[in-house]
Structure formats: structure tokens, C-alpha cells
Amino acid sequence: MPYIKKTITAGNYVFVEKHYAIRYGQKRLPRSPNIRHTSEQQKRINELKKRRRLLWIFCTNFANGDKWLTLTYNKGKRPADMAQAKADRKRFLRKLRDWYRKNGIPFVYMAMTERGTKGGLHHHIVIRGTVDYNIIAKSWEKYGGWQAKTIGVDSIGGFTDDILNLAKYFVKGRSEHSEKNYTKSNNLHQPKVDIEIIGAERWTSKPRPKKGYDVLDVHDGFHDFFGKPYQDYIQVRRC
């Protein structure tokens, strides 16, 4: 039985996903009964796909030297719900976008708003290249405090120069189950995705890296939702 190999090139990382193509090459094979997921299961599947895509985009577009912003609220200024927090974030990003446009600098960013473990909402924003701290302070001072860190220099969530783990932190937040909302600029580069049909009965348990790369995070198992075997792993370019 052949299998599908999906390769995603995202910056210094290559993500590889393998799973069996049960119907490939079997045009007359009767279609199996559809798997009907509950609304909650489908919601979970869609959320996992979205986060995985965001992870790839983050790794494609950001690197050491870029900026990581955290925006928090003062007591009495905290939004009542996620909708209000998103409106605050939108106004803040609009002011930054205007500054970048006036200075002829592309505004490349990803942003995540999360409800913390104690119920408070806050924002994380990663921006490529330079940031004017004065415009950040002026744009957010009516809401609360802010902090700016440089990727590869400062510790962010316990990570310094590991873009992959920082991307995972951005996508997951403090908790897997916390309420989150994401947004991003329209000028982000997209990861390169290649799909191959491999005519082999099985894949190797110890994948070989491409030249100049190391393999990490190899996972073999069965999909929770589909019950099919899979293998995922990541390759990272050597420094």
C-alpha cells in the first residue's frame, strides 16, 4: 500500500508528515462509510489544523533579531470579553501600521490574544525587524503596560534563540485549552508544501535527514480521529 509524504519547508525547518493513501490507485474500490465526527470533534480537528499552519508560517517568517511584544491591561481597563480585546488589538495594530507605512517599512506581524490562567486577557505580537518603542508606548498607554523583547537575545517564555519552540509557545499559549484568537498581516511568506506518493509498503522508523539538517521530534502513532498510522518529524538546518 503506498503512502503520502507531505514535506513543508518553513525557514530553517522542514516538517514531514506521512500517512497511508488507502484509496490511491484503487479507482474501483468501493468507498468506505464516511466517518461522521461530532461537532466538537470536527471543531478540534479544525483547530489543530489551524495551529499547525500557524506554526509553519511563524517559522517561515521570523528569526533572531525580530521583536516579541506582550501587551497587558491595567486594572479597570480590562476588556469584558474576547471581542473587546480583539477590538483593542485591532486599534493598536492600525496605529503601528500607519507608522510603518509613513516610514516606508513593511509591517510584517503575527498576533495572538489569550485568556490567561487567572482569566485576564493579554496579547502577544511578533514583528519582523525594527520597532519604534515610542509609538508602541503611545499606542497602548491608555490600556496598560507593555514589554518588548528581541528574539535570540532575550528569554521569551523560557526560550531564547529556538524559533521552533517559540513558535509552539506562540501557537499554544500558556495552556492548550485556554481561549485564544489569532491574526496576521497579509504580506507573510507562505511555507513551501510538497506532496509525494511513495510506492512502498512502509516507512522507516528512523528517517534520514536531508544534507545539512538534523532530525528531531519523530512521532509514530495512530491518529486519534481517523485511526490510521502516521509518522511526523522535523528537520532543522545545522548552524
Image (cartoon, helix red, strand yellow):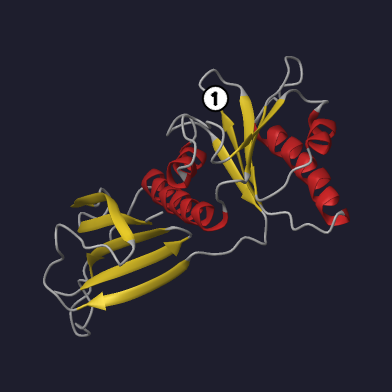
199 with respect to 103 (left or right)? left
Query: Quarter holding the C terminus?
Result: bottom left
Residue 2 percent coordinates (x, y) = 18, 75
Q: Residue furthest left?
A: 201
Who is closer to the viewer here, 182 or 137? 137
Who is closer to the viewer here, 44 or 219? 219
> Which residue is at a point 23% across and 50% down the rendered structure image?
219
Image position of 208 with respect to 140: above or below = below
Image position of 8 with respect to 88: above or below = below
Residue 198 percent coordinates (x, y) = 22, 76
What's the amino acid at mark 1? Gly
Q: Residue furthest top?
A: 75
Residue 27 percent coordinates (x, y) = 22, 85
Query: Quarter holding the N terminus?
Result: bottom left
Who is closer to the viewer here, 74 or 179? 74
How many marks on residues?
A: 1
Q: Residue furthest front?
A: 239
Residue 130 percent coordinates (x, y) = 72, 47
Residue wearing tag 1: 116
5 with respect to 228 (left or right)? right
Asked which secondary structure carries label 1, the reply is loop
> Which residue is at a point 69% across and 38% down the rendered structure image?
86
Label 1: how many Cα within 10 Å (few below 14, some 14–19, many 20+): some
